[in-house]
């Protein structure tokens, strides 16, 4: 995955490291050249001191080196070798193995080897009345290597320290520079799926302003699409309910006026019309509970006991008709949510319990707070749900194999969809008192705000 942070680090750190390495090498080379120049100057002085002791006599060329000169030459800290060569190539003094260079320069200093050891050599050619006398002085490189190590140590640590400090400053600067992006990312990450409000542009860096503007345009289009979908669903619900209600009314009138032989068929048609109406209502509710449709809904504080009381009152006639004891145990609980969506949760849970509970059963609606989390639940003492089906009952159109009677398998699917929109959990538990039945509970976040 491409990273702006890594790219900035690479673009800043790699050239910086290369620059510091080049600087280290140049500093080391410059300091080493200065030290070598000083030692070369001493080597040339030694060659000049030997050349100054050359004398041309009638008997030939003589080289006399007093003890103090030899002591000075040997006191340099390295082994010093010399050779004085007559114009005819004869060795006048010193080590015969020293070979002068073939160059014609008056003074030449360079690297050479003596007995397989590296040495630094100075060759001085001195004109005399008897011809050109060549003085060769060679010195081992021990002190030069020691000085090179000291120079490397002295140059390396300041440069490495500067490099580390520069790297820390670059990393800190990149982190500070990318902080607005992290703030923007955190703000977007903290938003729920239904929050389509525009991102603030105050204080946004100029480089990220086009990105924020593009995101705001996208959020605006999503909100408009959500509102359009909600309007369509509301219109569709109205258009479906009206003819279905008229159909049910006409069937009820036809049932009352029909002869007994035809009432059975009309009763079946009336039951089918009720099922179609119920299914249409659930399909529309499921569509409205989808995240893409519910994203534009505003959430506010909802009192669960009040909502549960309304739902129980609406279902009381049906419960009495079926001989079911429908009760309410309401403890204080408030959450941040959508009233009509939560009303749909209550309605579907109570309808599901009343549909599947047998005559004479008990259905209890509860609200409250447990472990800091608000909840609502509906419990019945009906046939219950097998343990292996307790998760599958939330799937769309799934009905337990032992289920009898009307139903479409959408009620609990709608409950879970709406619960997820509120960052809540919908799950099936055994009844509180044990025994038969089932308890469907919706647990909301501890903060009360999804």
Image (cartoon, rainbow, N blue to C red):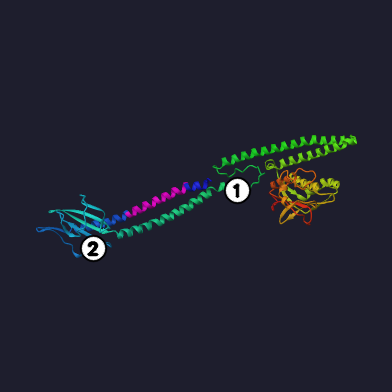
Q: Which residue is mark 1?
A: 186
Name which of mark 2 and mark 1 comes first in the sequence. Answer: 2
Q: Nearer the viewer, mark 2 or mark 1?
A: 1
Q: CA distance from mark 2 to mark 1?
A: 77 Å
Task: Please say whether residue 432 is one of the residues in the magenta stretch.
Answer: no
- Vertical arrangement, residue 182 with respect to residue 371, above or below: above
Q: Is residue 24 visible?
A: yes
Question: Tag 2: Cα neighbours inside 10 Å, few (<14), some, or many (≥20)?
Answer: few
Residue nearest the viewer, comparing 317 with 276: 276
Residue 59 place in picture, x, y as percent: 9, 59
Q: Is residue 338 visible?
A: no
- Say what secondary structure mark 2 lies in: helix
The label on residue 72 is 2
Q: Quadrant of residue 285?
A: top right
Q: Is residue 402 left or right of residue 149?
A: right
Residue located 80% across and 36% down the image: 244
User: How many labels were placed on the picture?
Assistant: 2
Which span is picked out in magenta? Answer: 11-32
Residue nearest the viewer, comparing 82 with 406: 406
Q: Which residue is outermost to the left?
A: 58
Residue nearest the viewer, comparing 349 with 142: 349
- Say what secondary structure mark 1 lies in: helix
Residue 20 place in picture, x, y as percent: 41, 51
Question: Tag 1: Cα neighbours inside 10 Å, few (<14), some, or many (≥20)?
Answer: few
Residue 140 place in picture, x, y as percent: 27, 59
Main structural element of the magenta stretch: helix, strand or loop?
Answer: helix
Q: Quadrant of residue 55?
A: bottom left
């Amino acid at each position: 995955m491409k990273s702006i942070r890594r790219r900035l680090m690479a673009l800043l750190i790699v050239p910086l490291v290369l620059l510091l390495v080049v600087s280290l090498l140049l500093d080391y080379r410059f300091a080493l050249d200065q030290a070598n120049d000083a030692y070369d100057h001493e080597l040339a002085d030694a060659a000049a001191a030997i050349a100054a002791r050359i004398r041309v006599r009638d008997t030939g060329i003589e080289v006399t080196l007093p003890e103090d000169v030899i002591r000075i030459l040997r006191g340099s800290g390295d082994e010093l070798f010399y050779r004085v060569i007559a114009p005819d190539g004869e060795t006048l003094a010193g080590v015969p193995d020293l070979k002068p260079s073939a160059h014609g320069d008056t003074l030449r200093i360079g690297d050479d080897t003596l007995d397989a050891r590296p040495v630094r050599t100075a060759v001085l050619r001195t004109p005399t009345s008897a011809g050109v006398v060549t003085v060769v002085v060679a010195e081992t490189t021990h002190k030069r290597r020691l000085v090179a190590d000291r120079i490397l140590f002295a140059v390396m640590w300041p440069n490495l320290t500067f490099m580390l400090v520069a790297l820390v400053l670059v990393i800190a600067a990149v982190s500070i520079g990318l902080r607005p992006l992290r703030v923007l990312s955190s703000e977007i990450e903290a938003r729920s799926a239904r929050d389509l409000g525009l991102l603030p542009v105050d204080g946004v860096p100029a480089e990220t302003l086009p990105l924020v503007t593009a995101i705001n345009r996208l959020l605006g289009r999503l909100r408009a699409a959500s509102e359009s979908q909600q309007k369509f669903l509301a219109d569709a619900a109205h258009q479906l309910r009206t003819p279905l209600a008229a159909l049910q009314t006409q069937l009820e009138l036809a049932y009352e006026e029909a002869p007994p032989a035809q009432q059975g068929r009309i009763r079946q048609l009336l039951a089918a019309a009720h099922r179609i109406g119920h299914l249409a209502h659930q399909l529309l509710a499921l569509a409205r509970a989808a995240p893409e449709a519910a994203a534009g809904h505003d959430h506010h504080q909802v009192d669960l006991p009040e909502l549960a009381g309304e739902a129980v009152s609406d279902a009381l006639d049906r419960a009495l008709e079926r001989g079911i004891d429908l009760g309410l145990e309401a403890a204080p609980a408030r959450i941040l949510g959508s009233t009509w969506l939560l009303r749909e949760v209550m309605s579907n849970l109570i309808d599901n319990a009343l549909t599947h509970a047998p005559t004479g059963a008990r259905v209890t609606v509860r609200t409250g707070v447990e472990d800091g989390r608000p909840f609502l639940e509906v419990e019945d003492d009906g046939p219950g749900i097998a343990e292996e089906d307790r998760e599958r009952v939330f799937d769309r159109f799934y009905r337990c194999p032992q289920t009898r009677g009307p139903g479409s398998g959408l009620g609990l699917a709608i409950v879970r969809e709406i619960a997820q929109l509120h960052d809540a959990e919908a799950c099936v538990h055994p009844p509180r008192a044990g025994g038969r039945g089932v308890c469907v509970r919706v647990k909301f976040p501890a903060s009360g705000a999804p």
